[in-house]
Image (spheres, helix red, strand yellow):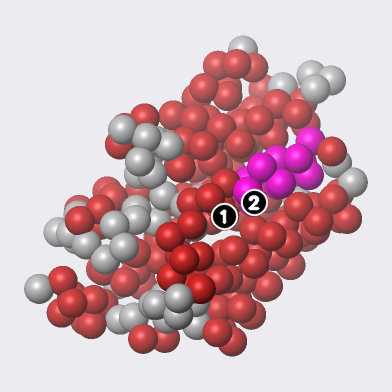
Amino acid sequence: MEYLLVLGSYLIGSIPFGLVLGKVAGVDVRAAGSGNIGATNVARLVGKKLGGLTLVCDALKAILPMLVAAWLLEHDSRRELWVALCGGAAFLGHLYPLYLRFRGGKGVATALGIFLYLAPVAAVIDLLIFVGVVYNWGYVSLGSLTAALMLPGLVWLLTGSLSKSVLALAIGVLIWVKHRDNIVRLMQHEEKSWRKDTPDQDDHDQR
């Protein structure tokens, strides 16, 4: 049953909520803006409300499989490990979704969902770090990279759990890998600032 739970978590994580919500608004988010299916691109293209809804859905698609796994494996001695694996599988589903030929998002919202469940205090602190970086410098990608860098240490310090800390490290590395183009643009001072990105401006840029 444990392996079926992990597989199910991957399939749920593969659901491209950003793409679905974008199409509801009449926009294929893969063909506009950054081309990413995550909350940031959705917000830029069709507005902050749908962007926020995308973020919530991308977080919940990690939380719900872990809740189910924790419930079904209540008496399993390796419950913590399997729940963490289900969270990791949902994260991989978002990054490499079966339904989109393994071309997915960057995983920040899904990672937030995972650690709001596994290590809520660490997740809240990391979220505050993300908000602080974005507020001060205006780059969502820089906030994401900073939060991913800080996450493993926060999880280890606040939980002492090896499985959770290893998962945080793996997720942090994958977030950096998925942001490699953003890293190049940040180094070349070509990254878009969130303060300058509005739906109207992006719509104009795409015409």
The furthest residue to the top: 1
Q: Mark 1 points at which residue?
A: 176
Crowdedness near tag 1: few (<14), some (14–19) or many (≥20) residues, C-alpha within 10 Å: some
Q: How crowded is mark 2: few (under 14 residues within 10 Å), some or many (20 or more)?
A: many
Q: Which residue is drawn at 70% across and 40% down?
A: 167
* Residues at circles 1 and 2 in contact by the CB criterion of under 8 Å: yes
Which picture quadrant has residue 133? bottom right
Q: Is residue 138 or residue 188 the one in the foreground?
A: 188
Note whether 58 is above or below 40 in the view shown. Answer: above
Amino acid at dot 1? Trp
Which region is colored magenta? 163-173
- Mark carried by residue 135: none
Residue 70 or residue 177, whichever sits in front = 177
Residue at left offset 79%, top offset 36%? 163
Please tell me whether mark 1 or mark 2 is closer to you in this view. 1
**Which secondary structure class fits the magenta region best?**
helix
Q: Is residue 14 within the magenta segment?
A: no
Residue 172: which numbered mark, if any? Answer: 2
Answer with the quarter of the image where residue 46 lies: bottom left
Q: What residue is rendered at 66% in x and 30% in y?
A: 85
Q: Position of residue 107 (x, y in %)?
A: 50, 50
For residue 88, say whether it is visible: yes
Q: Is mark 1 on a helix, strand or loop?
A: helix
